[in-house]
Image (tube, grey):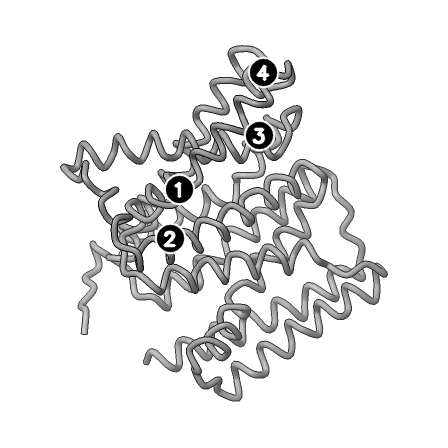
Amino acid sequence: MIQHDEKSLQRGALFAFAAYGSWGLLPLFWKLLSSVESTQILACRVVFSLVFVWIILALRGKARWWTLLLNMQNLKALALSALFISLNWGLYIWAVNSAHTVEASLGYYINPLVNVLLGLLFFRERLSPLQWSAVALAASGVLLMTTFSGVFPWISLALALSFGLYGYAKKKIALASLEGLASETLLLAPLAIGFLLFRQSHGNGAFSGGSIQIALLVSSGVITALPLLWFARAAKLLPLSTLGFIQFLSPTLQLALGVLVFGEAFPVRNIIAFAFVWAGVLLYSVSYIRRKV
């Protein structure tokens, strides 16, 4: 059993809050690029994440991380994870810049419960009565959201499912966060670079918008990789149950930004629907802690 002293717990908590806080505030960054097509932002994120992570790994003496892709089993798993993370990133960027930040936050609230269901389907994990109740509450919230608005919350569910399937694909291979991100973005980079060059050659490329826009696009690699570094440190220093609670900082910040900063609608009926989801999330957290104790 891993022992966690007070100093390591404090450091771990700082890294965890830095990681999840950064992910929660990410909509502010994407809003700065709202004049750029979401697909081009995604392509830039892929390319510059690869560049930034490659530099970090080289400085750490891991310049030959790419040899992981020479193994066919690794290649298949990483290709699958690259597909799901690109879908997740692209949809999230589009959602934020299309005034759907509140719906995006719902997706990340229900993501842990989607993971529970994926574990049931793919890994034959057994759910406790508390976990079944948590899933039922969250499903009720989604159903209420659909009933109240008359629109199926596909953005929320697509984000939760794509990120859940990304985690499922990652379980196929034991790989550190940075090496995984580097490998995934390397697989996606040819498509991303080709797309950016195509758009640029037709006069409506992302790099035609001035120096500030270019600087923001380049820095998308940094804002992608740094939270992963912080999360990796937190995961080593904190119990998983503690991380499980702190992870809800991210969608909470996204929700607050959507309503208070971006002015997205959040009527009382949405509060009722979200309350069912929050209750499910709380129940899931309780069941998770009881299982770990």
Residue 122 sits above or below residue 254 on the image: below
The kind of residue on which mark 3 rests is Gln
Q: CA distance from mark 2 to mark 4?
A: 31 Å
Q: Which mark sits nearer the N-terminus, 1 or 3?
A: 3
Instruction: Look at the numbered discs 1 and 3 and tell me whether their residues touch, using CB distance below 8 Å.
Output: no
Instruction: Name the residue beneath numbered marker 1.
Output: 187
Instruction: Name the residue beneath numbered marker 2.
Output: 78
Outermost residue to the left: 61
Name which residue lies at 57% across and 61% down: 161
Of 288 and 116, which appears nearest the observer? Answer: 116
Q: Report the side of 127 relative to 239 (left or right).
A: right
Image quarter where the C terminus lies is bottom left
How would you rate the neighbour count of disc 1 (Cα within 10 Å): few for under 14, some for 14-19, many for 20 or more?
some
Q: Which mark sits nearer the N-terminus, 4 or 1?
A: 1
Q: Nearer the viewer, mark 3 or mark 2?
A: 2
Q: Residue 156 at x, y = what percent?
A: 65, 57
Name which residue lies at 52% across and 84% down: 130
Q: CA distance from mark 2 to mark 1?
A: 8 Å
Instruction: Look at the numbered discs 2 and 1 and tell me whether their residues touch, using CB distance below 8 Å.
Output: yes
Question: SS class of the residue under badge 4?
Answer: helix
Mark count = 4
Name which residue lies at 23% across and 37% down: 57
Q: Residue 6 at x, y = what percent?
A: 22, 59
Of 140 and 252, which appears nearest the observer? Answer: 140
Instruction: Name the residue beneath numbered marker 3.
Output: 40
Name which residue lies at 18% across and 74% down: 1
Q: Nearer the viewer, mark 1 or mark 3?
A: 1
Q: Which mark sits nearer the N-terminus, 2 or 4?
A: 2
Q: Nearer the viewer, mark 4 or mark 3?
A: 4
Q: Report the side of 117 relative to 72 (left or right).
A: right
Instruction: Name the residue beneath numbered marker 4.
Output: 201
Q: Which mark sits nearer the N-terminus, 4 or 3?
A: 3
